[in-house]
Image (tube, rainbow, N blue to C red):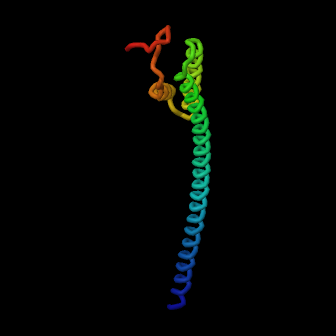
Amino acid sequence: MSSSTEPSHAQAVSHQVTAFIEGLKEAIVVSMAAAAEGIRLESEVARVMQRMGAYHAVLEGIESQKQALRDLLKQNRSAAEKESLRFQLKLLDQQTIAVLTRSGLPAEVAKQTVAKQLSEPARDAKGRIAKN
């Protein structure tokens, strides 16, 4: 009787080993897929961070130019020169909005962000500070 149980026991063990090996294969495949996905995600994060760094550098450059123009506005200049400087500031504001929009910020939010940053008060046609 013991001989009839042995093949059945051996078959059961063989089935268990086979199932274990199949489970390991599946776990390895799933682990490899997860690792590949992780690498892809890390690569995407690195790409986005690099892109954000580039946008930041552009925005810093624009802000530096704007500050130089603001400093010139504070100096004793003719009305025409001041108007030209204000126009240049507006162009740089538009450039800032374009960069912010391109970086993924909605256009309206970008416009509001730039509007809140403006330190130069609104002026009337004669160059005087406009009253609200």
- The residue furthest front is 76
Q: Residue at x 54, y 34 (%)?
A: 104
Q: Nearer the viewer, residue 65 or 93?
A: 65
Q: Determine whether 45 is above or below 26 in the image.
A: above
How many numbered circles does the render carry?
Answer: 0
Whole-percent x and y of residue 130?
42, 13
Whole-percent x and y of residue 100?
54, 31
Residue 82: quadrant of the picture? top right
- The residue furthest left is 132
Residue 47: quadrant of the picture? top right
Q: Residue at x 56, y 14 (%)?
A: 83
- In what quadrant of the picture does the C terminus appear? top left
- The residue furthest bottom is 2
Horizontally, residue 44 falls left or right of residue 130, namely right
Q: Determine whether 39 is above or below 15 in the image.
A: above
Residue 65: quadrant of the picture? top right
Q: Residue at x 56, y 76 (%)?
A: 17
- The residue furthest top is 125
Whole-percent x and y of residue 41?
58, 50
Q: Nearer the viewer, residue 32 or 10?
A: 32
Q: Nearer the viewer, residue 2 or 117?
A: 117
Q: Nearer the viewer, residue 22 or 39?
A: 39
Whole-percent x and y of residue 25?
60, 67
Q: Residue at x 55, y 72 (%)?
A: 20
